[in-house]
Amino acid sequence: MPAKDLFHDAVKHALLQEGWVITHDPLSLKVGRKDLFVDLGAER
């Protein structure tokens, strides 16, 4: 799993303040034999 960058917590906080729900932190995806990680999964 990759390290969180400098802005991760600020972006997460801003999304929560705007009414978003964080569904995954981080969001992991499997594509074939590769594992991919996205910073956040969120929905409104």
Image (cartoon, helix red, strand yellow):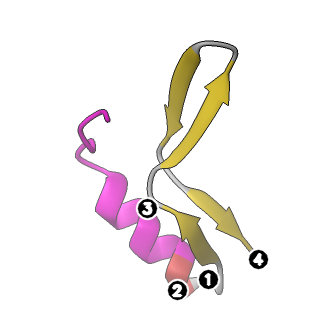
**Residue kind at label 2, given as amino acid type:** Gln
Q: Which residue is mark 4?
A: 44
Given contact means CB atoms under 8 Å apart, are the residues at marks 4 and 3 in contact? Answer: no
Q: Which residue is mark 3?
A: 11
Q: Which of 8/41 is in front?
A: 41
**Sooner in the amino-acid sequence: mark 4 or mark 2:** 2
Q: Which residue is mark 1?
A: 18
| 13 magenta-colored | yes
**Sooner in the amino-acid sequence: mark 4 or mark 3:** 3
The part of the chain drawn in magenta is: 1-15
Q: Looking at the picture, how far across and down is residue 38, in whole percent?
A: 53, 39
Q: Nearer the viewer, mark 4 or mark 3?
A: 4
Looking at the image, the residue that sits furthest to the front is: 33
Q: Which of 18/38 is in front?
A: 38
Q: Which mark identifies residue 17?
A: 2
Q: Residue at x 60, y 13 (%)?
A: 33
Up-down: is 10 above or below 4?
A: below
- Secondary structure at numbered mark 3: helix
Describe residue 38's horizontal placement relative to residue 4 as left or right.
right
Given contact means CB atoms under 8 Å apart, are the residues at marks 2 and 1 in contact? Answer: yes
Q: Looking at the picture, how far across and down is residue 4, in whole percent?
A: 27, 44
Given contact means CB atoms under 8 Å apart, are the residues at marks 4 and 1 in contact? Answer: no
| 38 magenta-colored | no
**Sooner in the amino-acid sequence: mark 3 or mark 1:** 3
Q: Quadrant of residue 19?
A: bottom right
**Residue kind at label 4, given as amino acid type:** Arg
- Looking at the rendered structure, the number of numbered marks drawn on it comes to 4
At label 2, counting other C-alpha atoms closer than 10 Å, the crowd grade (few under 14, some 14-19, many 20 or more) is: few
Q: Which of 5/3 is in front?
A: 3
**Residue kind at label 1, given as amino acid type:** Glu
Q: Looking at the picture, how far across and down is residue 8, in whole percent?
A: 34, 54
